[in-house]
Amino acid sequence: MKRSLLIGSVVALAASIPLVACHHRPANQAPPRATDAISLPPQASTIAVPIVARLDELSAALEQAVPRELWSIDQPGQDCLASKRVQVLGVKIKTPRVECRVVGNVARGPITLAGQGQDLVITLPMHATVRARDIAGVLKQETATGDAVVRAHVRLSLTRDWKPRATLDIHYDWTNAPGIDFLGQRITFTSKADAKLKGVIDKLERTLPSELDKLHLDRQIGKAWASAFTSLELNHANPPVWMRVTPKDLRYGGYAVEGRQLVLKLGMQAQTETFVGNRPPDPTPAPLPPLHTLDGAPGRMLFVIPVIADYRELEPVIARALVKRSARPFDVPGLGAVTAQFGKVTCYGTTGGKVAVGVQFAANGAHGTVWLTGTPVNAPNSRVVSFADLAVSGVTDSTGTDVLLSLANAPGLSETIAAALAQNFERDYAKLMAKIDRALTDKRTGDFVIRARIEDVRTGRLKAAGQGLYLPVEGTGTATVSLDMR
């Protein structure tokens, strides 16, 4: 950035100064110094906030909440075999009703959770052991076993206060229905088990929502919201640049089951502001707002970052070029060959969005400082700088003002300065973008990490302020606030 300002300040100097200087005598004072700071407009961004819940935690919670033995049964006087009419040798007779005592239990196996997309599936395997005792006073006991699988298809939603809610579609299948053979007929116990299974399903429907609450999704969302009220360092020094993030709204865009994780898709709408200088104070966190629906994909960040030329860094560039040029005399119209000695160079922002350059030199017994001013300009999305409205605005601490003005208008002087300043912002722009890209790597605030990436940039119009000459860089990127418990 050291030679950035100098690009056009004197590129146009060679042509513009002679014309202006001939029309009026400049004032005997330096141009006033501007005191305005670099101010960049705030931008509206949407930061992605993925909230992750581990399905293993929900599985463990359900394992603890659902008992291993789901139910037991002990029912005497049950119809193990109902009476019915049959034909024996052409005669219809009615078989006796067979009673028995039904006892048994059903135990569950490990609960598993799986899913993909928006489908979360809870699987509950069950094993039934059913005994029929005192069968019609003939058989003491017969044992039947069976297996069933309960599946709960779950769809989640969030309430306005960010609490999870679940809609369940539960069904079960007997993979092996419990039953015994008696007197040539099959006695099944599925009806007895079905009545008990309904109670199991009802309990699962009551249990799951309360277990979802134990994931504390609303607490994680609240922490992520509060952690985003912060400032990110974009450039550490020369100059320090900060981006302050102020969340304004939080929106919900659904969820997805990814492997063993349940990922909530949230988009945080925030204001991003760029500051040059010391770290700005973090904004005061606001309460978590009610849930609203997110339209579109979250994670788009807009920013404005200044590429800045510090006026003090430009001064030695001009001075070195002039000292080198002073080894040869200048051809000054009306004076002939003139040898000049150059001293201090001063550069700063002046009023009207212009830059002032003061060159101190001595020649032919005259000495003083000549002040030049000009307006920096550039084409859209270009880092090449030129200057308009160039003029000699003052001569200070001088003797022999006419000699100084003649030398200031000499082509040799303006061409020397032009050569020294024939740079552009491209190099400084590339360096700053590389530093910002490194600076935007993971920024930790508590348990949360803010990740930002630059994707596309374009440059705006040059502006001269008291704080420096700067080129606004407008860009887009992505930003994410995520939990990281390392």
Image (tube, rainbow, N blue to C red):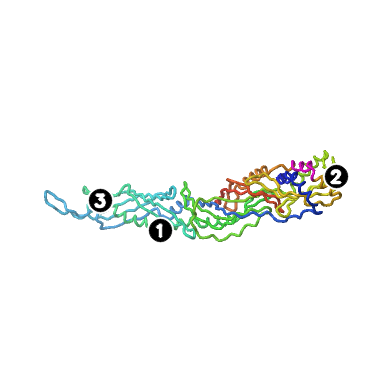
Residue 139 - label: none
User: Would you name the residue on which mark 2 appears?
Assistant: 363
| 114 lies left or right of 132 | right
* Crowd tier of the residue under label 3, counting other residues whose Cα lies within 10 Å: few below 14, some 14–19, many 20 or above: some
Q: Residue lying at the far top in this picture: please name it.
A: 328
Q: Main secondary structure of the magenta part?
A: helix
**Secondary structure beneath label 1:** helix
**Of callouts 1 and 2, which one flags the residue occurring earlier in the amino acid sequence?**
1
The residue that mark 1 highlights is 206
Q: Nearer the viewer, mark 1 or mark 2?
A: 2
Q: Secondary structure at mark 2?
A: strand
Closer to the eye: label 2 or 3: 2
Q: Amino acid at mark 3?
A: Ile
Residue 454 spot, x, y in % from top left: 59, 46
Q: Where does the magenta region start and end?
A: 409-419
Crowding at label 1, few (<14), some or many (≥20) Cα neighbours within 10 Å? few
Q: Viewer-proximal residue, 8 or 233?
A: 8
**Mark 1 or 3 closer to N-term?**
3
The amino acid type of the residue labelled 2 equals Ala
| Residue 142 image position (x, y, % from top left) | 27, 50
Q: Which residue is mark 3?
A: 187
Hey, which quadrant is residue 417 in on the image? Answer: top right
For disc 2, the neighbor class at 10 Å (few under 14, some 14 to 19, many from 20) is some
Where is residue 295? Give x, y as percent.
49, 53
